[in-house]
Amino acid sequence: MENGQKRKPSVWDALIPVVALVAILSFSILKYEASPHIPLVISAVIAALMSIKVGLKWEEIEKGIIDTIGMSMQAIIILMIIGTVIGAWILSGTVPAMIYYGLKVLSPGIFLVATLIICSIVSLATGSSWTTAGTVGIALIGVGQGLGIPLPMVAGAVVSGAYFGDKMSPLSDTTNLAPAMAGATLFDHVKHMIFTTGPSYLIALVVYAILGAKFAGRQLDVGQINQILDALSKQFNISLWLLIPPIVVIVMVVKKVPAIPGLFQELS
């Protein structure tokens, strides 16, 4: 190959950076319990060297790096906003209000199914499983504890609903990133995910309905529930107005508001 002449990368050219990444990461984490950042940088250097080997110039490699960062920037910004949303929902009283009204409305027999559906709706509205688990998930854990339902079951329902909504939400960082990298449109991507996500979601609904039926008619610990309600009332000004943020984001999903403005609207 003449100097500077490009050639099509072979299978080994493509595999070497991947194998190096796995090997360096495994060695660093297992042997020295190091963070993954330095191994990732070293692997990026190896990938750049392999690109030069097949005839690419550094200017082309740099442009590819910048273009890739640009495509993933929306997902990075969304992840940065998520932490703020979680804190805002907790401090504003939205999460305590969900716990308060949840304890008043839910019953043991339908709680697990309701948890799955509620987390699905909120995750679909926020576009983030982390936001759902950190806000509504915490609320439902408190409700489940008050109703006497085993917390591992409640946590499973929270995670199931949160990941379903995150996967299907047009506000989700990964749902936006995947079609952007593959060259597909957002809503075509969501439409085709229904074929795999839909059946698994229905199976989860059936399983949680069966598990929840075991707790139907169970005697509630009224004293413990009242203690939780009293504590929430003293610490927060519980009101139906606090439920406006999740309602607003659901409306924005229906209106197909872009992800970043939609998440910022939750903070306003």
Image: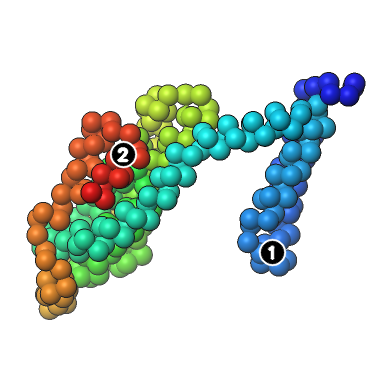
State the residue at coordinates (36%, 65%).
Answer: 152
Q: Are marks 1 and 2 in contact (CB under 8 Å)?
A: no
The local secondary structure at tag 1 comes to helix
Image coordinates for residue 222, horizontal then vertical, percent: 11, 74
Image coordinates for residue 95, horizontal then vertical, percent: 23, 60
Image coordinates for residue 207, horizontal then vertical, percent: 32, 51
User: Which quadrant would the N terminus be assigned to in this image?
Assistant: top right
State the residue at coordinates (30%, 45%).
Answer: 264
Image coordinates for residue 73, horizontal then vertical, percent: 49, 39
Q: Is residue 108 visible?
A: no
Q: Earlier in the sequence, mark 1 or mark 2?
A: 1
Left or right: 82 in relation to 22: left
Which of 6/66 is in front? 66
Residue lying furthest front in this view?
59
The local secondary structure at tag 2 comes to helix
In front: mark 1 or mark 2?
Answer: 2
Which of 55/249 is in front? 55
Q: Report which quarter residue 105 is drawn in.
A: bottom left
Q: Which residue is mark 2?
A: 261
Residue lying furthest right in this view?
2
State the residue at coordinates (23%, 49%).
Answer: 268
Placement of 150 over or under 206, stated as above or below: below
Q: How far apart, in angstroms, are the residues tagged by discs 1 and 2?
A: 41 Å
Q: Which residue is mark 1?
A: 30
Left or right: 36 in relation to 129: right
- Within 10 angstroms of label 2, few (less than 14), some, or many (20 or more) residues? few
